[in-house]
Amino acid sequence: MPTTLRRFARFAVVGVIATATHTAVFSAAIELAGVEPVTANALAFGVAVLVGYALNRRWTFAARGARGARLWRYVAGALAGLAVNSGIMAAVVHGAHASPYLGLALAVVLVPPLTFALNQYWVFRPRT
């Protein structure tokens, strides 16, 4: 399997793990700690970003050094992905007055390749 394809597959696996982490933290915060949902979502997003960063840094891209700078770039990339995802959803639901599931389907297809490219060529790019 070519390196880029292997990395994308690993990136997808990390995405599933990060999503599961987000869901678990969100649910625990609401159900066990009684945290307000918007606050719980922000907390869960933060934890999921850290899990995604750690796994992508070590397993997907096998990056060495510059941890602090890479973490901030990873957070910026995650927020860019969230912004594109939200923009797609807003355009589909509010602009086109279509089903939010169409927005979700479009986001699932369009956002991961974008965030993968950000990670491959910006966040975890080998330093010369």
Image (cartoon, grey):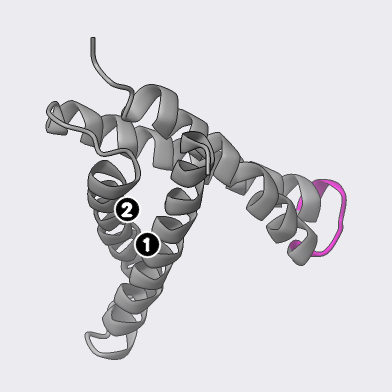
Callout 2 environment at 10 Å: few (<14), some (14 to 19), or many (20+)? many
* Magenta span: 94-100
Image spot of residue 90 (x, y percent): 70, 49
Image check: 113 left or right of 8? right
Magenta-colored stretch includes residue 96: yes
Give me the disc on residue 18: 1
Residue 73: x %, y % from top left: 30, 30
Residue type, label 1: Ala
Q: In this view, does 27 lie to the left or right of 92?
A: left
Residue 105 belongs to the span the image colors magenta: no
- Judged from this view, the residue extending furthest toward the bottom is 32
Which residue is at the far top? Answer: 128
**Outermost front residue:** 1
Up-down relation of residue 5 to residue 65 (above or below): below
Report, in whole angstroms, how far the alpha carbon at label 1 lies from the one at label 2: 5 Å
Closer to us: 85 or 123 = 123
Residue 41, labelled with which disc?
none
Is label 1 in contact with label 2 (beta carbons under 8 Å)? Answer: yes
Residue 52, numbered circle? 2
**Residue for point 44% across, 57% down:** 15
Q: Which residue is drawn at 76% across and 45% down?
A: 91
| Rendered position, 52 above or below 75 | below
Residue 56: give x, y in percent of width and height.
31, 46
Total numbered labels: 2
Residue 49: % across, % down: 31, 52
